[in-house]
């Protein structure tokens, strides 16, 4: 009898924890890890279509990667050109978005201003994020078209029609503005959550000591908001490198004008879904996008995160 009691007491329920978390790992392995490894694997193979015939898969080593960095007839390395396009349009949208969202977050969380109707404003700001990017792009495509409302207003005031989508910087600017409009609400809410997570006694102490709003912002809010800022910038960078649907519509799916709105994912899509359906080149380009994303994310993280335990370097001769 005593042995049965001991056996009953020794039963471990730890296995149920593994059972409950197993679905996540199963889904991750099947839908993310295996496709990632297979993409890396096929990047070393030649596999494409010529008409109705399929060539490969034939092992070619690093030839696909070499082709990515080979210049075209004009001497341009396309992967660098399209990376530059992607980064320019991301920066044009992300920098104003971050600054505008930070200002709104500080205003809405200020104990001095006490803005009323915050729930309403949060809902309104977040609503653009719920609309499909393609729908947003089509809306602006119609607004700024050659016979759209914007050009009609310009013409009615005696101006000449502007071909917004046939000029490099206006086309890029519209794409950047759409991304800004779609995501500033989400960024604002994240920054508001970060500010509200700061100990309010710090703000009260600063107010008692007579600190100005500017001093409170730079000495308390910004240093303690740094982890959220890093998260926001890195996730925004990852999303920017995956930019596809908005420039696909605004740039007529060809990166018009002159390939200036062609992004890395659009370039990938040309290999993946083009007439040749080149799986080898698309795999190599996917791996390069993965590497570029990782390197840029590490650079952002290292440049913004400081180790407080690391001793600061002092100049020679200083005491």
Image (tube, grey):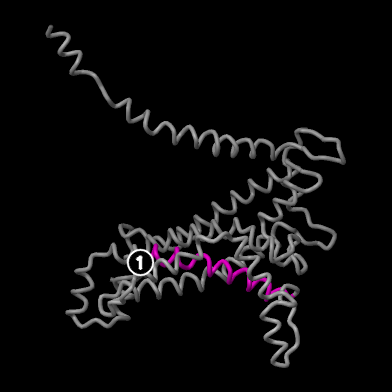
Q: Residue at x 40, y 75 (%)?
A: 103
**Nearer-the-camera pick, 267 or 13:** 13
Image x and y of residue 3, in percent: 16, 8
Q: Crowding near pointer 1: few (<14 within 10 Å), some, many (20+)?
A: many
The image quadrant that residue 305 belongs to is bottom left
In which quadrant will I find the N terminus? top left
**What segment carries the magenta color?**
167-191
Q: Residue at x 74, y 44 (%)?
A: 64
**Nearer-the-camera pick, 226 or 265:** 265
The residue identified by callout 1 is: 192
Image x and y of residue 51, in percent: 87, 41
How many discs mark residues in the rendered view?
1
> Element type at marker 1?
helix
Q: Residue at x 41, y 67 (%)?
A: 188
Q: Residue furthest left?
A: 2
**Nearer-the-camera pick, 33 or 129:** 129
Instruction: Describe residue 61's horizontal placement relative to residue 191 as left or right.
Output: right
Q: Is residue 169 above or below residue 198?
A: below
Q: Is residue 193 above or below residue 283?
A: below
**Nearer-the-camera pick, 122 or 89:** 122
Residue 178 belongs to magenta span: yes
Image x and y of residue 156, in percent: 71, 89
Q: Residue at x 74, y 58 (%)?
A: 78
The image quadrant that residue 45 belongs to is top right
């Amino acid at each position: 009898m005593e042995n049965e009691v001991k056996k009953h007491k020794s039963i471990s329920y730890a296995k149920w924890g593994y059972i409950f978390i197993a679905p996540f790992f199963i889904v991750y392995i099947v839908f993310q890890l295996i496709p990632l490894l297979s993409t890396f694997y096929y990047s070393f193979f030649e596999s494409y279509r010529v008409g109705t015939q399929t060539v490969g898969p034939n092992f070619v080593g690093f030839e696909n990667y070499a082709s990515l960095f080979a210049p075209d007839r004009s001497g341009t390395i396309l992967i660098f050109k399209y990376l530059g396009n992607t980064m320019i349009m991301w920066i044009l949208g992300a920098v104003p978005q971050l600054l505008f969202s930070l200002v709104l977050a500080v205003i809405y969380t200020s104990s001095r201003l006490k803005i009323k109707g915050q729930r309403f404003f949060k809902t309104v700001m977040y609503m653009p994020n719920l609309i499909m990017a393609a729908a947003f792009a089509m809306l602006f495509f119609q607004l700024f078209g050659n016979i759209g409302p914007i050009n009609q207003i310009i013409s009615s005031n005696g101006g000449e029609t502007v071909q917004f989508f046939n000029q490099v910087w206006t086309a890029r600017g519209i794409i950047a503005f759409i991304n800004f409009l779609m995501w500033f609400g989400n960024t604002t809410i994240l920054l508001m959550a970060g500010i509200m997570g700061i100990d309010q006694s710090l703000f009260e102490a600063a107010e008692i000591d007579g600190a100005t709003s500017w001093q409170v912002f730079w000495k308390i809010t910004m240093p303690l908001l740094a982890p959220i800022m890093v998260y926001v910038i890195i996730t925004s960078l990852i999303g920017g490198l995956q930019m596809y649907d908005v420039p696909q519509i605004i740039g007529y799916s060809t990166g018009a004008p002159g390939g200036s709105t062609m992004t890395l994912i659009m370039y990938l899509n040309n290999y993946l879904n083009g007439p040749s359906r080149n799986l080898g080149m698309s795999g190599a380009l996917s791996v390069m996008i993965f590497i570029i994303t990782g390197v840029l994310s590490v650079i952002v993280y290292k440049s913004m995160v400081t180790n407080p335990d690391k001793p600061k370097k002092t100049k020679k001769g200083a005491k």
